[in-house]
Amino acid sequence: MIPAPNTKLALSFISLLFFLSFTSTVFGQAAVTGGSGISAIPPRLEATVEPDGANTYTLKVRNESPNARDIKVSLRDFIVTDNQGTPNFLDDLPQNLNNRWSASSWIQVSPSQLSLKPGETKTVRLTVMPPLNALPGGHYAAVIYTPDAFSLYNTITGSSIQTNVGTLLYITIPGDINQNASVLSFSAPKFSEFGPIDFTTTIKNSSDIHIQPVGAITVKNWFGRKTSQISLDGTNIFPYTTRDFKNTLNKKWLFGRYQADLKAAYGSAGGLVTATLFFWVIPWRLIILIIAALAIITTLILIIKRQPKKPKKTDDQVAQLEKELAALKKKYSDN
C-alpha cells in the first residue's frame, strides 16, 4: 500500500525531529523531546564501570503531550562516523562495521514497557554489567523510548507514525586506554579586508575513547600583544573519527599581520594539541580612499599657494598717483 501524501510528509517531518533530537544530545542539553511529546531525562549519561562490575543508574521519561502514551523501552548500540558528531545506530549501518564500541548486550533496563498519562513522569532503572573481558575504552549505546503505534493514531489522517527519543550512554571501561589526538587542519583566510575572521579546526581522535578538547584560540597582533581569545566548543570527538570546530573572531576593524595559536587539552592523561597560523587584515579600499582624499587636498593647497600675489604699491607710487589726480582736477576746474 502506497502511503498518502500527508503520511509521507509526516514521516519526513518525524524523521527530521528524531535526527535533531539525537544530534542535540551530543551537546549536553538537560532533556530532549521527540515529535511524539516524549522527553528523555537526561539526554546523555556518562558512566565508568569496572569489568565484571554492575552499576545501576536512574533515568526518567516524561509525557509532554496532551494524550496518554504507551512506551516501549529498548536498547540500541550507536557510533559516530562523520565529522559532525551525528550518532548512527549500528543495526542501521553495514554489518561488517566494527562493533568494538557496542555495549547494549551488557545493559538491562526495567521496565521494558510503561504507560504515561499526559504530564506524567516515570523512572527507568538502568543496570550496566560489563563482562570480565570487556575492552578498556569507550562503549556506546542508547536507551530508546518508542511510543506504541495505537497511542499515536491520528484520527484525522487515519495514520499512525512512530517516533523515537532516548538517552545516549557513554560507558568507559577503565584500564590501559590509548589516548591520542592531533590537529589535521587549522585554517583562516590568509588575507581579509575587514573582520570578522572565521577559523576552521579539524581534530582527529585516534583514541580508544571519546575525547572533549578544551582550549582556546589566542590571537596576537604584529607587536606580539594578545588582542583576543576565542574558546573552543566543548564537544565530543568519538574514537577514530574527526570533528570540525568553527570559531569566529568577531571584530570588524583590524589592521596588519596577526598570529593565531590554538591550544586544547584532552583526555585523562593531559594530552595537548597545538597549531599556529598567520593572517593579514588590510582594509585596502579604505586606504586607497584616504590616499585619494589626501592627494586631492594636497593638490588644492599647492594650487592656492602658486597663485600670483598682487604687488604692493609703494609710498612713491601712491604719491605720484595723488599728484596726477590733483593735476586732472585743476585742469578740468580751469576749463
Image (spheres, helix red, strand yellow):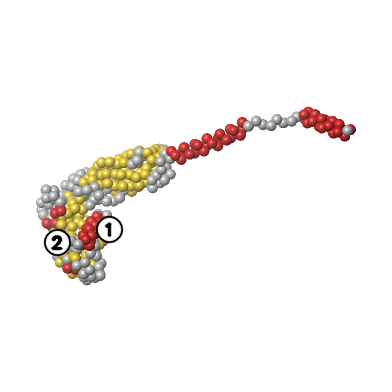
Residue 146 falls left or right of residue 333: left
Q: Position of residue 150 (x, y in %)?
A: 17, 68
Which one is in front, 192 or 78?
192
Provide the residue designation for mark 2.
1
- Three-letter amino acid code of the residue under disc 2: Met
- In the displayed structure, 145 sits above or below 242; it is below
Residue positioned most to the right: 334
Report the label total.
2
Provide the residue designation for mark 1.
29
Which corner quadrant holds the N terminus? bottom left
CA–CA distance in space, label 2 to label 1 = 39 Å
**Does the image show residue 160?**
yes
Residue 278 falls left or right of residue 147: right
- Three-letter amino acid code of the residue under disc 1: Gln
- In the displayed structure, 80 sits above or below 167; it is above
Which corner quadrant holds the C terminus? top right
Q: Position of residue 224 (x, y in %)?
A: 39, 39
Disc 2 vs disc 1: which is toward the camera?
2
- Badge 1 marks a residue whose secondary structure is loop
Quarter of the figure with residue 35: bottom left
Q: Position of residue 145 (x, y in %)?
A: 18, 62
Q: Position of residue 294 (x, y in %)?
A: 52, 37
Looking at the image, which residue is at 20% across and 57% down? 168
Looking at the image, which residue is at 16% across and 63% down? 73
Q: Which badge, 2 or 1, comes first in the chain's sequence?
A: 2
As drawn, the label of residue 81 is: none
